[in-house]
Amino acid sequence: MIIRNCESTVGDICEFRYGVRPTVTINGDADYIFAHIPMHLEYIITELLKNAFRATVERGMEREPIEITIAPLPEGATPRGSEHSISNVDQGAVDLASNSLPGYSGKSTLKDSMIRPLQESTPGVTIRIRDRGGGISPENYKHIWDYSFTTFNEDEANDSLSTATAGSDAFNAISGATGGSSIAGLGYGLPLGRAYAEYFGGGIDVQSLWGWGTDIYLSLRGVGNVEIKEPGNG
């Protein structure tokens, strides 16, 4: 299971840095299967678990398990947090140049500019990650979607950058610092994870109770339908 693989990776990083690793409990429909791109799903979940693990340990709550709930979306439901999903215009999938030509008689695509990138009929899922890490402070909460915003101090952030950039280009530096061997990095993990989720018709919502903990809701729309074959049917 992808979630367990991500848990193992983040747990190793957390134990290396802090000497301890929180446990993770999974409930809901733990065996649910839907079609998605493993690399993107692993990236998003890894980044969300990094935040949860770090907050839990730094608050001294490592004995409290991080709870992950898997809830398949009802048929026809809109994924939570997807109200602001990117449009075809944002993706560059609308032929604006042809529509601007004098006398162009082709069918205009502008009216379809708000069609979501995935069909509404594909199965989806919401994954909630709940931790007891004390929540997000009010002064930080308003910046959580800002690229390059991090609660690491300058030396820690520079260490993450120098580790990630060794022999890599700028793009790999960003993805390496957020998805590599550091428990936190340059502040790209959460906003970039949300961008991936929105591209696939979903989104990320954050609900924080300052002084207690944080709930993260990751909603995703599948990229197709999965056929479950019955035993004996090939």
Image: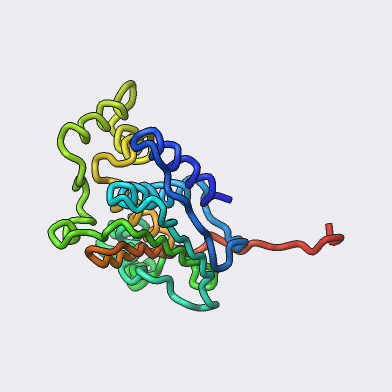
Residue 31 seen by the camera: yes
Residue 210 image-quadrant placement: bottom left
Picture coordinates of residue 28, whole percent (x, y): 55, 68
Taking the spot 35% from the left edge, 69% from the top edge, the residue there is: 81
Reply above or below: 130 against 76. Answer: above
Q: Residue furthest top?
A: 167
Q: Nearer the viewer, residue 223 or 46?
A: 46
Q: Nearer the viewer, residue 193 or 154?
A: 154
Taking the spot 41% from the left edge, 60% from the top edge, the residue there is: 129
Task: State which quarter of the image contains the C terminus.
Answer: bottom right
Q: Nearer the viewer, residue 215 or 145?
A: 215
Left or right, 208 with respect to 10, comes to left
Picture coordinates of residue 220, whole percent (x, y): 46, 63
Picture coordinates of residue 164, whole percent (x, y): 31, 29
Residue 202 image-quadrant placement: bottom left
Picture coordinates of residue 79, whole percent (x, y): 43, 71
Q: How is the image coloured?
A: rainbow
Residue 192 seen by the camera: no
Q: For the image shown, how many numbered marks are present on the structure?
A: 0
Taking the spot 58% from the left edge, 51% from the top edge, the residue there is: 1
Q: Residue furthest right?
A: 232
Reply above or below: 166 against 78. Answer: above
Taking the spot 36% from the left edge, 68% from the top edge, the residue there is: 82
